[in-house]
Image (cartoon, rainbow, N blue to C red):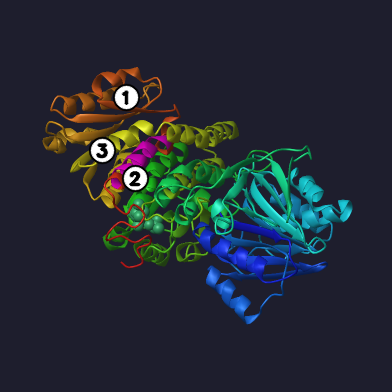
Amino acid sequence: MCGIVGYVGDHQPDARPLEVVLEGLRRLEYRGYDSAGVALVTGAGGLATAKKAGKLANLVAELDARPLPGATAGIGHTRWATHGGPTDVNAHPHVAGGVALIHNGIVENFAVLKEELLADGAELLSETDTEVVAHLLQRAYAEVKDLGEAMRLVVRRLHGTFTLLAVHEDHPDTVVGARHDSPLVVGLGDGANYLGSDVAAFIAETRRALELAQDQVVVITPRSVTVTDFDGNPAEGREYTIDWDAAAAEKGGFRSFMEKEIADQPQAVQDTLLGRTDTHGRLVLDDLKIDESVLRAADKIIVIACGTAAYSGHVAKYAIEHWCRIPVEVELAHEFRYRDPILTERTLVVAISQSGETMDTLMAVRHAREQGAKVLAICNTHGSTIPRESDAVLYTHAGPEVAVASTKAFLAQITAAYLLGLYLAQLRGNKFADEIAEILDDLRAMPEKIQEVLDRSGRVREIARWMADTSSVLFLGRHVGFPVALEGALKLKEIAYIHAEGFAAGELKHGPIALIEPGQPVFVIVPSPRGRDSLHSKVVSNIQEIRARGARTLVIAEDGDEAVKAYADEVFFVPQSPTLLAPLLSVVPLQIFACELATARGLDVDQPRNLAKSVTVE
Ligand code: AGP
């Protein structure tokens, strides 16, 4: 989820390429702000670069202090760190010989390629997968002396997701790009052409765009755009006119960042899964860096987190206990250290945090470590405080989450927790390799199923708009559906300011059912009817109990579950999936409902009142 910009223009070397690239990066900075960098082709044989950790302002200050020469072409990058911390060295662009390269995505097989380069005498300076690609490109160019062909040779060797842009010092009139499972779009100008990870990169320059398809390489010069597939066969992009305003362009055309981030969830889950297995299919959580003996010896896991992150921990509890037979407690971080928890050196504390800066969670991490427990962070923000103060980290790869209400980070946290549970089961021998492989296959099928839920969102949006004046909504779920109910209620509370409460469905008759009166909207997350120990019939009974008292039942159920229709005023079907993985699907209609209802109310979905994206006070 990095910001990527490219420019080439028909003029003598001047300040224009840098101006265009910096303006594009400014509009893309929300996509990543761990570092920023530019590379300019300053004329035949001239390559000038600058890059700095931190926000774009740091790069601008660097350029003010040490100006770059005029140029005819340039590329720029704002980074959301995946491989390697947010440092100057790891910042893009990466240079190898006369090549400068920037990258958005994750090269899954970079370790193998890196070994090959090191054996061939390459000197790599950074921890990144991108630098490996830069050296491969430089070597390929040395063979074929054509940047477009060199790019095709390289991309055919890469596994994972990538958008790549490259320039070469010998070609002041050329920028080359390639994309696989990661966005890239061409901006069409007059005597100049542009490339970007989305149209915000060049919307200030042109509204004519050319959409590139999967597995294409594009070569732009000031007066030409040449598209091929990875084998060099000519291809066509789809030309269109951008009708968004600049602000909408920064949200990818969505009305809010939250809406965009809900739509980004298949990619967030897919990217979090990428690069986690070796060539034999065994799980390798290489960024974990915790001694395997610690994980084998663990006799209790305590998850500490706040808000949505805590609810991902509740989902994790069911999965990890089932797969690993280790007791898992889930604690609100702000309660954890005041209850004098029982911690030993065999307690594994898992701190879940999107921002990595939540003070309640950080203080709980410090307490746990003072008490001798090992702490493993699940975090979305490289280099943030919580991973830095933990013994180990498992990063999610959801990309920057701008909206205060967490959505894609929630799914990525759940995914990372599943990976941790399977890794523990693998290490401790609770599961055979083929059992783990089967669950991993089910997990890899989830991004497509999440996309299917997104594609079906019309009805839930319609219901949300129709219910815009609602004053109270209840959410019921059982087993892994219970934390989903809690999360659905939290979304509605925090962005629509509606009283909403999530309950364990079985708890209703112990008091909360008194809240049910005619017309009371109640979402019910219904588990799959498949499987001998399904809780389906119990939850259907709960639906009957509330319908008998006049509730308006809005049911989330899996495809083929016809039985629920008799008891539901509305049914939102999601694709079938294994019970433990179902939260990745069942929460999505609830996210969309809250977002659409708040939008219908005219509220600021991305910056709700009273809230902050990261709560850095206790
Ligand atoms: C979720 O929508 C909220 N913004 C909030 O509950 C958030 O999940 C919580 O503050 C934890 O934040 P963190 O994941 O950055 O630690």
Question: Over which residues does the magenta segment extend?
Answer: 585-598
Residues marked 3 and 1 touching at CB (< 8 Å): no
Q: Are marks 2 and 1 in contact (CB under 8 Å)?
A: no
Labels in figure, total: 3
Residue 327, quarter of picture: top left
- Left or right: where 173 falls relative to 315: right
Q: Is residue 335 visible?
A: yes
Q: Based on the displayed image, in which of its 4 quarters is residue 488 positioned?
A: top left
The residue under label 1 is which amino acid type? His
Q: Mark 2 sits on what residue?
A: 595
Residue 180, percent from left and from top: 65, 43
Q: Residue furthest right?
A: 143
Characterize the local packing of mark 1: few (<14), some (14-19) or many (20 or more) Cα atoms within 10 angstroms. many
The outermost residue toward the front is 190
- First reached walking from the N terminus: tag 3 or tag 1: 3
Between the C-alphas of marks 2 and 3, the distance is 16 Å
Callout 2: few (<14), some (14-19), or many (20+) C-alpha neighbours within 10 Å?
A: many
Nearer the observer: mark 2 or 1; the answer is 2
> Callout 2: helix, strand or loop?
helix
Amino acid, disc 3: Phe
Q: Earlier in the sequence, mark 2 or mark 3?
A: 3
**Mark on residue 536?**
1
Q: Is the stretch drawn in magenta largely helix, strand or loop?
A: helix
Q: Position of residue 478 (x, y in %)?
A: 30, 34
Q: Residue at x 44, y 41 (%)?
A: 320
Residue in the foreground of this view, choosing between 586 and 154:
154
Q: CA distance from mark 2 to mark 1?
A: 28 Å
> Is residue 90 shown left or right of residue 260?
right
